[in-house]
Amino acid sequence: MNTADIAKEFTAALKAGKFEEAEKFWSDDVVSIEAMEGPMKEARGRPAVHAKGEWWTANHDVHSFEASGPYVNDDQFALFFSIDVTPKATGQRTKMDEVGLYTVRDGKIVEERFLY
């Protein structure tokens, strides 16, 4: 599969709420990088990136999740996310916008980088 095909299928899985299905596009050594300091700034490898997603789900009430895109350029694609969420720690409902930038090599996503 080329980058455009991966981007299309990965995005369709996210839009359908099938997050575990989207994980099949990750390489075994995928890296996930957040635009913040702290323990979730960087996760390396499938198990760590999956655990980061599990942590997010356990610690937030997501009221709505929208993904727009993909926007493809060479070996990368971007998605725009709009999330209505309440962090359980604060109880403050907020709208969050972010961009996910994904890099593909050898038919798998090797890096996801979030900008917000």
Image (tube, rainbow, N blue to C red):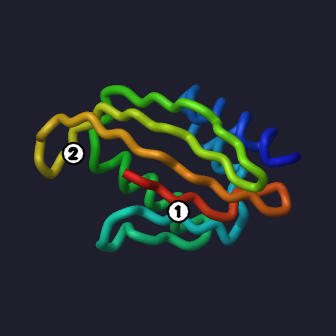
Q: Answer with the quarter of the image where residue 26 lies.
A: bottom right
Q: Please, what secondary structure does the residue beneath circle 2 have?
A: strand
In the image, farthest residue toward the front: 73
- Residue 112's place in the image compared with 84, above or below, is below
Q: Please, what secondary structure does the residue beneath circle 1 have?
A: helix
**Front one among 33 and 64:** 33
Image coordinates for residue 42, horizontal then vertical, percent: 45, 71
Q: Answer with the quarter of the image where residue 11 lies.
A: top right
Q: Earlier in the sequence, mark 1 or mark 2?
A: 1
What residue sits 71% from the left and 41% below the top? 7
Relative placement, left or right, of 84 versus 26 is: left
Residue 2 numbered tag: none
Amino acid carrying mark 1 in the image: Val
Q: Give the total number of marks visible in the rendering.
A: 2
Image coordinates for residue 108, horizontal then vertical, percent: 76, 57
Relative placement, left or right, of 78 versus 114 is: right
Q: Are dots 1 and 2 in contact, CB under 8 Å?
A: no
Amino acid carrying mark 2 in the image: Pro
In the image, farthest residue toward the right: 1
Check disc 2: other Cα within 10 Å, few if <14, some if 14-19, many if 20+.
some
Relative placement, left or right, of 78 versus 82 is: right
**Front one among 1 and 72:** 72
The Cα–Cα distance between marks 1 and 2, rounded to whole angstroms, is: 19 Å
Image coordinates for residue 84, horizontal then vertical, percent: 30, 31
Which residue corresponds to mark 2? 87
Image coordinates for residue 55, horizontal then vertical, percent: 37, 56
What residue sits 28% from the left and 50% below the top? 59
Which residue corresponds to mark 1? 49
What residue sits 56% from the left and 73% below the top? 44
What residue sits 52% from the left and 49% below the top? 100
Check disc 1: other Cα within 10 Å, few if <14, some if 14-19, many if 20+.
many
